[in-house]
Image: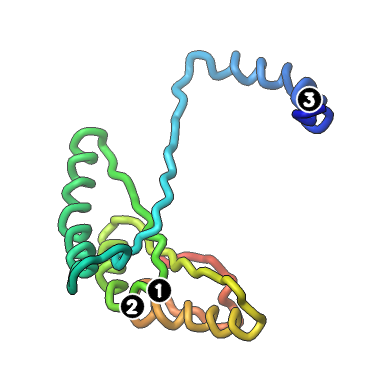
């Protein structure tokens, strides 16, 4: 069996009636479709001149709220953006990203690469991950003992 039908076909067939029933129930109802686009926000990527990374951040800070407003005007709501930000692109950009997030633009997620990590480097990286955004006001303070707690503050 090249497509491994034995793994998925039985459960697919068992769910056929339930899927048909669900389609009938929602036949005359609105279906909402959500799009999630993931983007690594790397302002230093392929820069060719001094200050280019900073200009990229400034452009986002200037243009993204205008884009959000056009969406609000046209559709009644605005998109939110998640900046997957690798800290090796510089902590100097985090204050501006934090401003955009706090202004309703979305959120900042720190994105770490863990190639060749050991228990020691992973632990030190994890502690640094929580120290960096706090200094930029991008995240609420997190104690090392609760660093896996993902509650968000308002």
Residues at marks 2 and 3 touching, judged by CB atoms closer than 8 Å: no
Q: Residue at x 23, y 46 (%)?
A: 68
Q: Which residue is mark 1?
A: 87
Q: Residues within 10 Å of mark 3 (few under 14, many from 20)?
A: few
- Mark positioned earlier in the residue sequence (3 or 1): 3
Q: Which residue is mark 3?
A: 9
Q: Residue at x 23, y 40 (%)?
A: 72
Q: Report the front residue among 145 and 93.
A: 93
Residue 32 rendering spot, x and y as whole percentages: 44, 30
Q: Residue at x 56, y 71 (%)?
A: 114
- Looking at the image, residue 107 sits to the left or right of residue 71; the answer is right
Residues at marks 1 and 2 touching, judged by CB atoms closer than 8 Å: yes
Which element carries disc 2, helix, strand or loop?
Answer: helix
Please, which colouring scheme is shown? rainbow
The CA span between labels 2 and 3 is: 50 Å
The CA span between labels 1 and 2 is: 6 Å
Residue 96 rendering spot, x and y as whole percentages: 25, 69
- Looking at the image, residue 64 sits to the left or right of residue 137; the answer is left
Q: Report the front residue among 113 and 92.
A: 113
Is residue 110 in view? yes
The quarter of the picture where residue 133 lies is bottom left
Which element carries disc 1, helix, strand or loop?
Answer: helix
- Mark positioned earlier in the residue sequence (2 or 3): 3
Q: Residue at x 73, y 17 (%)?
A: 17
The CA span between labels 3 and 1 is: 44 Å
């Amino acid at each position: 069996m090249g497509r491994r039908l034995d793994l998925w076909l039985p459960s697919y067939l068992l769910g056929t009636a339930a899927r048909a029933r669900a389609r009938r129930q929602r036949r005359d109802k609105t279906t909402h479709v959500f799009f999630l686009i993931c983007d690594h926000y790397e302002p230093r990527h392929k820069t060719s001149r001094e200050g280019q990374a900073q200009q990229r951040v400034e452009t986002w800070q200037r243009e993204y709220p205008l884009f959000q407003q056009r969406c609000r005007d046209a559709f009644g709501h605005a998109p939110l953006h998640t900046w997957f930000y690798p800290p090796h692109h510089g902590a100097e950009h985090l204050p501006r990203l934090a401003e955009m997030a706090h202004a309703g633009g979305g959120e900042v997620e720190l994105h770490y690469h863990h190639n060749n990590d050991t228990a020691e480097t992973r632990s030190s990286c994890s502690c640094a991950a929580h120290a960096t955004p706090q200094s930029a006001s991008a995240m609420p303070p997190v104690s090392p003992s609760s660093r896996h707690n993902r509650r968000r503050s308002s």
